[in-house]
Structures are given as structure tokens and as C-alpha cells.
Image (cartoon, helix red, strand yellow):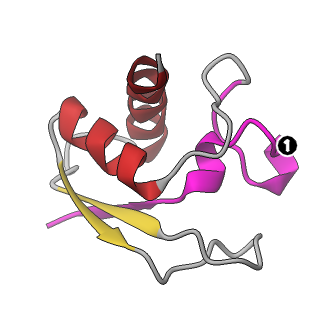
């Protein structure tokens, strides 16, 4: 089973690309949470497991991570872009 780990910094509008943001600014949101990310992952159609104690390597404070399971047929970048699109819808 393939697992991808997704961190809130990937979608954070307050971060630059060099600080870990992986989506364009028009898809980024302010202070994303692991709960929102997990909800978006489920909307995309994958299983999500929240790990609240995880810390992204470019950050000091733990904001958690979401482990996405069952992504054998999807590239990580495509997955991140799809999650970002749903995060924008969730926040509206």
C-alpha cells in the first residue's frame, strides 16, 4: 500500500515556495489545519490518517501531518493540487 504524507505547510499562504509551499498562491489558504486537509483528502476519495505530533522538516512547531493511503495511481504533486482545490471550497 502506497502512503503519501501531506503537511499543512504545503498549502499555507504565509509560506514561500522555498519554505515548503507546494501549491500556487491562488490555491493556498491561511493557516491550514490537519483536520481540513484530512476532510479534503476524503473528498478527493482517499483514506486519511491524522498524525498530530508530526513536524514538517522546515518548521519548528508541530502542526501535524496527514497520511494519505491508497495513492498507487496518483503522483504526489497531482494529489497535493487536488487537495488544495478542495481546501479552497471547504473554506468558503
Q: Which residues are magenta?
A: 1-24
Q: What is the quadrant of residue 83 in the picture?
A: top left
Residue 55, image x, y percentages: 60, 78
Residue 71, image x, y percentages: 22, 49
Could you tell whether 92 is left or right of 51 in the image?
Answer: right
Give the SS element for disc 1: loop
Could you tell whether 70 is left or right of 86 in the image?
Answer: left
Observer-nearest residue: 1 or 16? Answer: 16
Establish if 62 lies above or below 88. Answer: below
Establish if 6 lies above or below 21. Answer: below
Quadrant of image for the N terminus: bottom left
Magenta span contains residue 17: yes
The residue where tag 1 is placed is 16
User: In percent of the image, x 51 and y 80: which residue is there?
Assistant: 54
Could you tell whether 26 is left or right of 78 in the image?
Answer: right
User: What is the total number of numbered labels drawn onto the structure image?
Assistant: 1
Residue 32, image x, y percentages: 56, 45
Amino acid at each position: 500500500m502506497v502512503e503519501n504524507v501531506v503537511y499543512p505547510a504545503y498549502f499555507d499562504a504565509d509560506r514561500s515556495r522555498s519554505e515548503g509551499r507546494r501549491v500556487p498562491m491562488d490555491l493556498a489558504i491561511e493557516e491550514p489545519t490537519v483536520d481540513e486537509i484530512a476532510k479534503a483528502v476524503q473528498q478527493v476519495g482517499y483514506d486519511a490518517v491524522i498524525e498530530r505530533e508530526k513536524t514538517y522538516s522546515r518548521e519548528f512547531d508541530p502542526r501535524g501531518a496527514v497520511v494519505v493511503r491508497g495513492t498507487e495511481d496518483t503522483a504526489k504533486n497531482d494529489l497535493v493540487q487536488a487537495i488544495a482545490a478542495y481546501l479552497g471550497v471547504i473554506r468558503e
